[in-house]
Image (cartoon, helix red, strand yellow):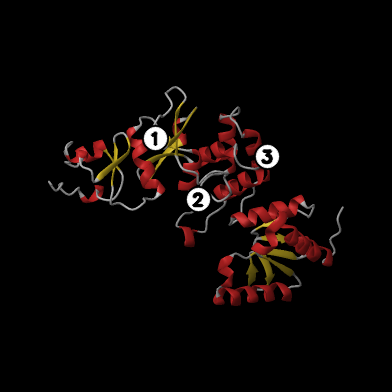
Amino acid sequence: MKIPRPLPANLASNPFTRQEALDAGVTVGRLRYRDLDSPSRQIFIPRSADERPLAERTRPLTLVTPFSAASHATAFLLWEFPGFLPGSHMPGIHISRPDTMGRVRRRGVIAHRGQFFEDEITTLNGLYITTRARTWLDCARKMDIDEITVVADHLIRIPRPEFEGRTAPYCTLADLEDMLDRHWGTPGIRKARLALEQARVGADSAPETRLRLALGRAGLPTAGVNVRTELGPGVVRQPDLSYRDWQVAVDYEGEGHSDREQIARDIAKEEDFSRAGWTLVRISKRHMSTDATTAVRKVRRALEEHGWTPK
C-alpha cells in the first residue's frame, strides 16, 4: 500500500480548500487519498484531525463560495455575543450572500440571502463575516427584546483598556440606529428598535443588563449604570447600578466573586458604602430566577428603607 506524502504543516490538522492545497504544492492525486474527508465540495480535512473550532470549520466555506460571509447564528457565536439566541448551537453553518445571487447549496450550510452594504461585511481571522452591527440585526428576529438589548449593551459599552486592549466601543448607538434605518423592512426590526430604546452605555455583563431591565419593569426608579460615586475624600466606587437620590447601590456578583481575594474586596466595598450612609445590595445568580423576583424584592426593600415610595 502506497503511503501518501505528508501534507504541509498548515494543512495537516485544519480544514482547507482545494485551491489552498494546490497553492501549497499538493497534487490533485494526493487529495484523493482516503486519509482526507471532504465535508463539502472543494473542501478537505484530515481524518486524523480532532473536531475543529467553529471558526476553522467556517473559514473555507466563505472562501469557496464567491461573495459569501458567515452570518446569523454562526456570526453570533464567532463574535462571542452574550445573550440567548434560540437554536444557536444547532448543527449547520450559516452563510449569507447578496439577494442578487443564488442561495448557497452545500452540505452542512444553512443559507441566507439579503441586501448587504459594502461596510456590513468584514473579516475575522481570515474568514468573511457580517459585522457585529449587522449580525445583531440579523439575529433579532429570533431573540426576545431583553436579549436583543443584552447584545446592544455589549456592543455600545465603553471598554476598559487595561483589561481589553481597546479604547473604543464595538459600535455606537448611532451605528445601530443607522443599521435599522438601512434595513427598515427586515424581520425583527421592530423588536430591535424597542431594544435600542432601552439600551444603555455602561453595562459590563449580560446579567447586569437583565437585572437593570427587571428592576425597571418592576416600577423601580431609573438607575445610573456604572456611575463613579464619591463616598468620601479619596473614596470612589463604581457600582453596577446606583440610585443616588436614595443612596442605594446594586452590584451583580458572578462566579468570580467566590474567590478569596475578591471576597475581601467585596467586603471592603460594602464597608465603604455603609460608612457613607449608603446601602449596597448584592445580587447573585440565585436571585435572578423567575424574572429576578428576589432581586427586585431586595432592591425595592433597600429603596423603601431610604425613603423611596412608589408613585
Work out how far the residue at label 1 is from the one at label 2, CA to CA, in angstroms.
39 Å
Nearer to us: label 1 or label 2: 1
Vertically, is 88 above or below 178?
below
Q: Secondary structure at mark 3?
A: helix
Say what amino acid the circle numbered 2 marks.
Ala
Image point 67% across, 63% down: which residue? 286
Cβ–Cβ below 8 Å for labels 3 and 2?
A: no
Between discs 3 and 2, the one toward the N terminus = 2
Say what amino acid the circle numbered 3 marks.
Leu
* Residue 82: image location, x then y, percent: 55, 51
Crowd rating for badge 2 (residues with CA inside 10 Å; few <14, some 14–19, many 20+): few
Cβ–Cβ below 8 Å for labels 1 and 2?
A: no
**Residue under pointer 1:** 107
Q: Secondary structure at mark 2?
A: loop
Between discs 3 and 1, the one toward the N terminus = 1
Nearer to us: label 3 or label 2: 3
Find residue 194 and name its label.
3
Between discs 1 and 2, the one toward the N terminus = 1
* Residue 80: image location, x then y, percent: 49, 50
Q: Where, by quadrant of the figure, is residue 30 drawn?
A: top left
Image point 62% across, 47% down: which residue? 147
Work out how far the residue at label 3 is from the one at label 2, CA to CA, in angstroms.
24 Å
Nearer to us: label 3 or label 1: 1
Left or right: residue 165 compared with residue 185:
left
**Residue under pointer 2:** 168
Crowd rating for badge 1 (residues with CA inside 10 Å; few <14, some 14–19, many 20+): few
Cβ–Cβ below 8 Å for labels 3 and 1?
A: no
Q: Residue furthest left?
A: 2
* Residue 52: image location, x then y, percent: 36, 50
* Residue 152: image location, x then y, percent: 59, 46
Say what amino acid the circle numbered 1 marks.
Arg
